[in-house]
Amino acid sequence: MDDLKKEKTQGLNFQYLGDVIDKKKEIGNKYITPGFGLAGQLFSMVAKHVIKELGPEKGEALLKDAIEEFGLERGRRIAEKVRAENKSLSLKNWLIYTDIDSIENFRPISSTPNGDFVVKIKHCTFINAAKEWGLNEYAKIYCKYVDYKILEGYNPDVKLILESRHDTGANRCVFRYVMKEENK
């Protein structure tokens, strides 16, 4: 008897469910959407409905306001964590105390040309997960506004120059963080 028929006729018990953990270990992360990816799917689905209801112009304006408020709040909270550790609001401390697992979610490739910190990101769980559901057009609205506001909330002295995949058509985003005064 297959599992569905068994559950419908016999119900559930711990003996029947006993191999769930072993089976999960066996398949690993194959069917897991990383947390930031789930956030991308949720945001994109909400954005789709907001734009459908309000139209492109008003819908994006509403989403922009919400995204910017969210970004500012994230930045402020990261700054609070850094200050609680009696640290300065440097870019280095932002990287240390940030609220997202950058390695897992982005697999960044970093360099430091001319004293700036440059990060190239091809893999983005937020965008990849939204694409899986055919929602990339809505996900890019989030990307368009959030990063500048996170940094503004954290430390407005950090300058970000962003080359977004959505604007350039490239298969990556490039974040250039500028702290050196002569580079600003």
Image: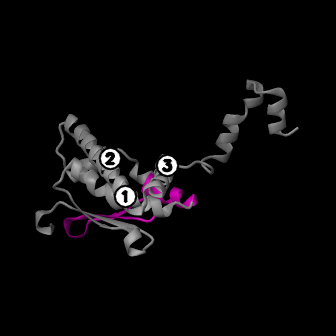
Query: Can residue 123 be seen at all in this image of the molecule?
Result: no
Whole-percent x, y for residue 105 in the image: 45, 53
The kind of residue tagged 1 is: Lys
Whole-percent x, y for residue 117 in the image: 26, 62
Q: CA distance from mark 3 to mark 1?
A: 20 Å
Q: Which mark is residue 70?
A: 2
The kind of residue tagged 2 is: Phe
Q: Circle 3 is placed at which residue position?
A: 42
Q: Which image quadrant: the C terminus?
A: bottom left
Q: Circle 1 is placed at which residue position?
A: 58
Label 2: which secondary element:
helix
- Label 2 Cα neighbours within 10 Å, binned few <14 / some 14-19 / many ≥20: some
The kind of residue tagged 3 is: Leu
Q: CA distance from mark 2 to mark 3?
A: 15 Å
The residue segment tinted magenta is: 105-133
Q: Which image quadrant: the N terminus?
A: top right
Label 3: which secondary element:
helix
Count of residue discs: 3
115 within the magenta span: yes
Q: Which residue: 66% across, 35% down?
A: 21
Query: Of marks 1 and 2, which one's residue comes earlier in the chain?
Result: 1
Whole-percent x, y for residue 149 in the image: 27, 53
